Structure formats: C-alpha cells, structure tokens
C-alpha cells in the first residue's frame, strides 16, 4: 500500500516531513479508519486507498498555503521546470 500511494518529498525539510506524516496518519485514522467497519482486508485496502486519493486531490493544508498536496507538488514541479 505504501508503494502504491507514496509521494515524493520534493522540497520538504526532514523535520517537517515527519510532522506531515504524523498529521496525515492521525487524519486517516479519525476520518476513515475509526469510522468504517471493513468486511475484509481487501475492503480496508480499497477504502484507505480511496481516502488517500481524495486527500491528495482535495484536502487543503495550512502548511502548504491552503492548497492540496497535488496542487502543491504541481507547483513545485512547475517551479523546477522554469528554473
């Protein structure tokens, strides 16, 4: 699962990366895992995968300037391409 949904840590400092990961795990547990009674490991895998996809596309982060992780990453890649 981690390989399928991992993201590159483009432009992040190591200390902040740990904080982001811990914050994400808390959000995943509170907003998805604790609220769902999965019928099987496969259903859990699928449900968590859908949550991660939605989180990366829609969840706004104050630490990223109130943009989603996808928008933030696209902005970094655009900056890198222009330099």
Image (cartoon, rainbow, N blue to C red):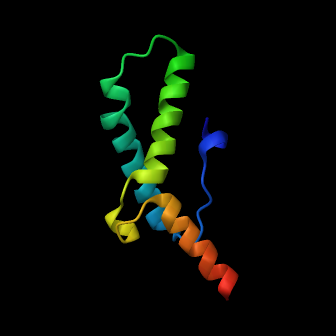
Q: Where is residue 14 in the image (x, y as percent from the top left)?
A: 52, 66
Q: Which residue is located at x 35 percent, y 42 percent?
A: 26
* Image-based side of 10 in relation to 17, left or right: right
Q: How many marks?
A: 0
Residue 37 in percent (x, y) is at 37, 16
Q: Which residue is drawn at 57% across and 74% down?
A: 76
| Quarter of the figure with residue 41 | top right
Query: From this viewpoint, which residue is outermost toward the bottom?
Result: 83
Query: Relative to 10, does residue 50 appear above or below in the rendering?
Result: above
Q: Position of residue 80 (x, y in %)?
A: 65, 80
Q: Measured from the top left, where is residue 32 in percent x and y? A: 37, 32
Quadrant in which residue 74 is drawn: bottom right
| Residue placed furthest toward the top | 39
Q: In which quarter of the image is the C terminus?
A: bottom right
Say above or below: 51 vs 7. Answer: above
Q: Dividing the picture into quarters, in which one does residue 7 lie?
A: bottom right
Q: In this view, does 39 lie above or below 23?
A: above
Image quadrant occupied by the N terminus:
top right
């Amino acid at each position: 699962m981690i390989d399928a949904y991992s993201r590159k840590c483009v432009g992040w400092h190591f200390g902040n990366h740990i904080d982001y990961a811990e914050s994400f795990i808390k959000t995943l547990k509170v907003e998805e895992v604790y609220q769902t009674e999965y019928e099987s490991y496969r259903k859990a895998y699928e449900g968590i995968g859908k949550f991660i996809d939605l989180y990366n596309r829609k969840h706004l982060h104050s630490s990223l300037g109130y943009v989603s992780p996808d928008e933030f990453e696209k902005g970094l890649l655009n900056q890198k391409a222009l330099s």
